[in-house]
Image (cartoon, helix red, strand yellow):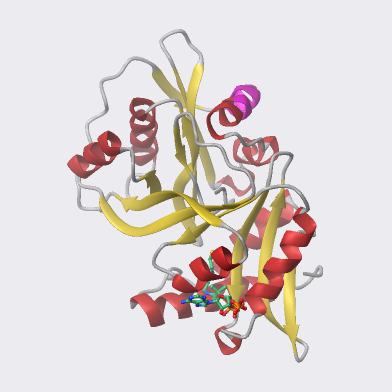
Amino acid sequence: MRPGEEAAVAALIHRSTNSWYRENLGREIFSGPPEDCWIFTETYGALDPGCCLVAEIDGKIAGSCFYHPRDSHVGLGIMNVDPAHAGHGVARALLAGVLERAGELPVRLMSSALNLDSYSLYTRAGFSPVAVYQDMVLPLDRPPPPPPLLPGTVRLANMADLFPMVDLETEVAGIHRAKDLAHFLRNPGGHWTTFVHRDAAGKIDGWLASVDHPGCRMIGPGVMRDDGTALALIHAQLAHRRGTSPVFLIPTHEMALVEELYGWGCRNVELHFAQVRGPYTQPEGVIMPSFLPESG
Ligand SMILES: CC(C)(COP(=O)(O)OP(=O)(O)OC[C@H]1O[C@@H](n2cnc3c(N)ncnc32)[C@H](O)[C@@H]1OP(=O)(O)O)[C@@H](O)C(=O)NCCC(=O)NCCS
């Protein structure tokens, strides 16, 4: 993507995603105008300038894919192909370009379990699903959940928390990406909110970010040592975001967490796979991934 092409790519993200969801699942993801998808080009432009590949057909952008090189891995997404060019290998070509740039590093992404096109695209290229997440929301008409009665405290994060947060993610999830976490804490545009949880001894044992923008309203990413910490952080984000209904991804195997969230009235809206090409270690805690930045 060259400078000046951001608006065209944002419009492509909007058109491609809404068209796929409308045709296959009878709903749309972006309810506002294409300009709402500037949140993707702006966020990725700030984090990784120059890391977006586009495919051109007859001089027009037919597909785009962002990638996010980090010390431990390369994140991939968001990937989009113009519906007029679907099924002709555009995504495969973009993916090949990212894999070439990733070299030996593992490549990680989130793919919808309801989308066989993207599932097939990635698994044919050597990715494999390593974790399943249920996308949940707390409907607007539900009363706020009671705060969990657990030891430890939750507060808004600040810059002094950056390195404990980075270290915790490395310990729990095996990835290292200080750049992304610093972005949440700097909070450009005022869309980002991050909470940390501290254990009884005052040590950070969980953090959870969220983004509140018309193009992406979600809680995540975050990492926590255990499900109780996850619950306390989700509660803090939901209380902070009352009046909206952000989506958040919960590992399907965290049964106690899922059961508690059902008790709060949360509903499932989609399923996602974390897919990895290359080495992967099982997390030592709870991971809540996000689509912005795509965090596999
Ligand atoms: C998902 C998406 C990017 C795919 O783009 P595309 O250009 O149509 O995909 P391609 O034509 O490159 O096809 C990819 C591969 O999947 C294969 N494939 C597709 N459906 C398949 C199936 N059911 N079983 C096996 N393979 C399948 C294709 O054959 C192709 O592999 P090949 O080239 O080795 O034959 C596109 O549908 C899109 O933009 N969707 C909306 C946005 C979205 O969902 N993005 C993904 C978010 S992670």
Residue 231 sits above or below residue 74 on the image? above
Provide residue 260's location: percent of width, then percent of height.
23, 36
Is 286 left, or right, of 150 in this rendering?
A: right
- Residue at position x 28%, y 49% from top? 138
Provide residue 71's location: percent of width, then percent of height.
74, 39
Q: Give the range drawn in magenta.
A: 158-167
Residue 81 sits above or below residue 1 on the image? below
Which part of the image, by quadrant, shows the N terminus?
bottom right
Residue 81 sits above or below residue 281 on the image? below
Q: Main secondary structure of the magenta part?
A: helix
Ligand 1: give its quadrant. bottom right
- Residue at position x 56%, y 37% from top? 281
Looking at the rendering, which quadrant does residue 183 occupy?
Answer: top right
Is 85 left, or right, of 289 in this rendering?
A: right
Looking at the rendering, which quadrant does residue 84 occupy?
Answer: bottom right
Viewer can see residue 208: no
Q: Nearer the viewer, residue 196 or 271?
A: 271
Provide residue 19's location: percent of width, then percent of height.
47, 80
Q: Does the magenta stretch include residue 45?
A: no
Q: Which of 214 and 110 is in front in this view?
A: 110
**Residue sitting at the far bottom:** 58
